């Protein structure tokens, strides 16, 4: 298997793009990445979207992507794994380059979520239709049950839970691509509308339009395109139960744990080597549990550690320097790719005011549903 | 000089508090009040509709105009709640007020900007010399489906403006319109309640058109926000007009007098006209007034007025808008509210 590097990244601003369609977002991010990499052509690409069909009645995204990005003729593949679609598309591109089948491969993720009236319904199709959605449970409800169980078991307070979005908004202030680049106060979280007790509106990631793209090539060719290639040192992917009730433990996410172990094993590093991590904070509680499953904190201690400042600059590990899903935004299919982009920018020393000093190895964790799938990447500056 | 020669407003006495509606649906009243910046809204009585509101407002306008009704050459009522789908509201009004029969009458519809549209056309008639006086009215008994966010704001009320060339109270200095095909809010035939595009009604609809018209108005007039004593914008809720005004450089002090939404809700076609009426109640000679309406679909009409020395003579000749709003109030519980608004069938 060949070593693989990231040589270019491209993003759209995350937010409400009333004047841009799905194809515009794909084209903007893809062309930005192609320009950033300085490549003339692609050998292949992967396009990730959770539900472009339900959001905008457009399937067959490989053709759409090729057509509107000037890539017709290039082989393209749609990748879907709910909110982990983006991460999985990077993994797919990695495999194609690593295998030697192709040299220059793009992974682009997209979601255009503001064009429908009931986005919660679309998102709920990523849960168990027969046992969960059919009975009226939506993702805020599922994660609220996890939060309630965690708070009961480990004594996490409501204020400590609120520290997650407060931190992530603080990070997003310095991210020009973020949907909500402003600070959020503790009282702003605690007084926001109740969504599913104990989760309030400011515990929940938003609805976002956006796209993100990365270009991969063999590491031994990377210097042809950039002085600062970023090596994908480890990848781990795992599936988990589709329904929350089939998790062995409500306060754990086994798929995250398994995917992390695989990535650590492949990379030959452990959590103490990681200086920052982009995790899937779709809800405040998700960041806490994911950070524990990734090995940064002991089970049951992640919430308090983040509340004490261990998840920000100067702490044990910087969690979500981009602002995370909560503040940067969560265009579902684009999220996993955007996480890899943030890690790449940090490792290339291109993160401006949110730059983590001496960042050498970073991690991303992208999750589908309530832990039904998880993809972890470990990236390294070379 | 062409401009407003008579003005007046009317707001029904019935009210329902946002907290009452919130209690019905299990919403958090404080969050709603904070989010919409309004505490209560007016509700039409059982015998009130767009026509009765328009007549009450026009009567007040006639009191201030001090003209014989039969001199009015055109009557336009803008509303999105005309009682009849086919049969004009304006014909009832002219007979009730002794206008006509040599009068041009039309009902206007352009979501929430139908009122300013009526004013715009009425003004154009007198400015062109086509007729001596013309009456433009914005009035509504706005619809909001039970449980919809609109239910907190959709209210009842209206304002009437008689335009002419003699004894002008407020001269029209400039007008503009900003229009595009933007489907942010609509009601198709045979539907009881309008539908809306949620947050799409904000930036790409309300703000784009309000700011588009406002900036053009400032541009063509060569004026800046600080040149005005007052400013009023369409008020779908409390927050939007203040945000639009602040974006343009207007201060809260300039907007407060016309910002009536917190006390009466969004009267749709009557919204910015009612705010203008409230400003006319207190404006002094020489005061410049900035007004921009908004109607979904979407468009904005903009006016710059300058109060003349005739205005103080007539301000007390009819009830003032804020006195009407703050006058007799009868609070309804949710049951009475849905009955008054004919949202349920009942035999009483």
Image (cartoon, grey):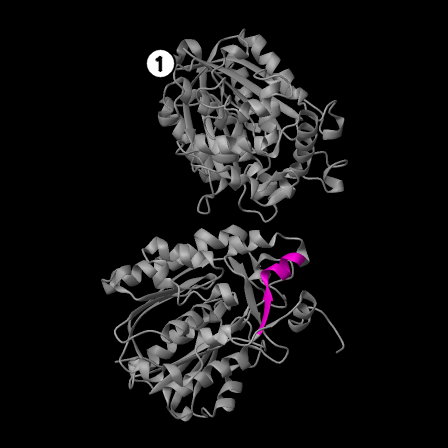
Q: Position of residue A179 (x, y in %)?
A: 46, 38
Queried whether the magenta region covers residue B78, the answer comes back as no
Residue B181 shows in this picture:
yes
Q: Nearer the viewer, residue B36 or B95?
A: B36
Relative horizontal placement of residue B177, taking residue B43 as reference (left or right) = left
- Res A55 → quadrant: top right
Q: Which residue is mark 1?
A: A224
Q: Horizontal and vertical percent for residue B227?
A: 25, 63
Residue B15 colored magenta?
yes
| x and y percentages locating residue A89 in the rendered image | 55, 24
State the SS at label 1: helix
Q: Residue at x 45, y 92 (%)?
A: B100
Q: Quadrant of residue B345?
A: bottom right
Q: Quadrant of the N terminus of chain B?
A: bottom left
Main structural element of the magenta stretch: helix, strand or loop?
helix
Residue A13 lies, with reference to residue B7, above or below; the image says above
Residue plotted at (47% across, 31% down): A323
Quarter of image, res B12: bottom right
Q: Using the image, name the chain to which the residue with label 1 belongs.
A: A
Relative to the observer, which residue lies in front, B320 or B112?
A: B320
- Mark 1 burial class by Cα count in 10 Å: few <14, some 14-19, many 20+: few
Image position of A58 with respect to A308: above or below: below
Question: In the rendered picture of this protein, how many numbered marks are placed on residues?
Answer: 1
Pick the quarter of the image with the C terminus of chain B: bottom right
Q: Position of residue A36 (x, y in %)?
A: 37, 25
Q: Which residues are magenta?
A: B14-23
């Amino acid at each position: 298997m060949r070593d693989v590097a990231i040589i270019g990244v491209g993003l759209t601003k995350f937010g409400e793009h009333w004047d841009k369609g799905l194809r515009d977002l794909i084209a903007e991010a893809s062309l930005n990445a192609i320009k950033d990499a300085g490549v003339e052509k692609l050998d292949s690409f992967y396009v990730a979207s959770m539900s472009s069909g339900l959001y905008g009645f457009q399937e067959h995204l490989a053709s759409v992507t090729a057509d509107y990005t000037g890539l017709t003729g290039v082989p393209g593949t749609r990748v879907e794994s709910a909110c982990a679609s983006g991460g999985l598309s990077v993994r797919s591109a990695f495999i194609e380059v690593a295998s030697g089948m192709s040299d220059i491969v793009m992974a682009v993720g997209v979601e255009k979520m503001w064009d429908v009236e009931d986005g919660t319904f679309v998102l709920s199709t990523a849960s168990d239709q027969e046992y969960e959605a059919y009975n009226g449970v939506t993702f805020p409800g599922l994660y609220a049950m996890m939060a309630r169980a965690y708070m009961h078991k480990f004594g996490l307070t409501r204020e400590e839970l609120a520290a997650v979005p407060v931190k992530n908004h603080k990070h997003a202030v310095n991210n020009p691509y973020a949907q909500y680049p402003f600070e959020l106060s503790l009282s702003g979280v605690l007084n926001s509308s109740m969504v599913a007790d104990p989760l309030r509106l400011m515990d929940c990631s938003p609805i976002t339009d956006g796209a993100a793209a990365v270009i991969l090539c063999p590491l031994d060719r990377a210097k042809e395109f950039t002085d600062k290639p970023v090596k994908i040192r480890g990848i781990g992917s795992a599936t988990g139960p589709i329904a929350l009730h089939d998790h062995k433990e409500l306060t754990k996410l086994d798929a995250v744990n398994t995917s992390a172990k695989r990535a650590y094993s492949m990379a030959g590093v452990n959590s103490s080597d990681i200086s920052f991590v982009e995790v899937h904070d779709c809800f405040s509680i998700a960041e806490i549990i994911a950070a524990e499953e990734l090995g940064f904190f002991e089970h049951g201690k992640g919430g308090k550690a983040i509340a004490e400042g261990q998840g920000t600059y100067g702490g044990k590990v910087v969690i979500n320097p981009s602002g995370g899903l909560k503040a940067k935004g969560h265009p579902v299919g684009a999220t996993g790719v955007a996480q890899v982009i943030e890690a790449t920018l940090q490792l290339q020393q291109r993160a401006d005011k949110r730059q983590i000093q001496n960042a050498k190895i970073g991690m991303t964790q992208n999750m589908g549903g309530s832990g039904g799938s998880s993809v972890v990447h470990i990236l390294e500056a070379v | 000089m062409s401009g407003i020669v008579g003005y007046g407003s009317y707001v029904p006495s019935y009210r329902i508090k946002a907290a009452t509606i919130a209690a019905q649906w299990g919403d958090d009243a404080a969050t709603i009040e904070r989010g919409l910046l309004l505490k209560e809204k007016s509700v039409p009585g059982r015998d009130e509709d767009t026509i009765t509101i328009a007549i009450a407002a026009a009567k007040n306008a006639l009191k201030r105009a001090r003209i014989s009704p039969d001199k009015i050459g055109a009557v336009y009522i803008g509303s999105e709640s005309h009682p009849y789908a086919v049969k004009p509201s304006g014909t009832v009004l002219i007979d009730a007020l002794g206008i006509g029969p040599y009068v041009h009458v039309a009902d206007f519809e352009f979501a929430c900007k139908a009122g300013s549209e009526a004013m715009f056309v009425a003004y154009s008639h007198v400015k062109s010399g086509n007729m001596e006086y013309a009456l433009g009215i914005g009035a509504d008994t706005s619809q909001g489906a039970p449980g919809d966010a609109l239910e907190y704001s959709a209210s009842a009320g209206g304002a009437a403006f008689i335009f002419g060339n003699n004894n002008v109270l407020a001269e029209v200095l400039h007008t503009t319109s900003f229009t595009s095909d933007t489907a942010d809010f609509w009601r198709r035939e045979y539907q009881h309640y309008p539908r809306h595009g949620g947050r799409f009604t904000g930036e790409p609809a309300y703000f784009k058109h309000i700011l588009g018209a406002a900036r053009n108005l400032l541009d063509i007039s060569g004026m800046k926000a600080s040149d005005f004593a007052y400013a009023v914008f369409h008020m779908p809720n409390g927050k939007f007009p203040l945000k639009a005004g602040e974006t343009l450089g207007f201060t809260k002090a300039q907007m407060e007098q016309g910002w009536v939404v917190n006390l009466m809700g969004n009267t749709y076609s009557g919204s910015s006209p009612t705010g203008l009426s409230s400003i006319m109640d207190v404006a002094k000679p020489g005061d410049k007034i900035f007004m921009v309406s908004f109607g979904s679909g979407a468009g904005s009409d903009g006016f710059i007025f300058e109060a003349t020395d005739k205005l103080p003579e007539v301000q007390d000749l009819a009830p003032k808008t804020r006195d009407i709003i703050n006058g007799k109030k009868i609070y309804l519980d949710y049951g009475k509210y849905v009955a008054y608004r004919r949202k349920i069938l009942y035999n009483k």
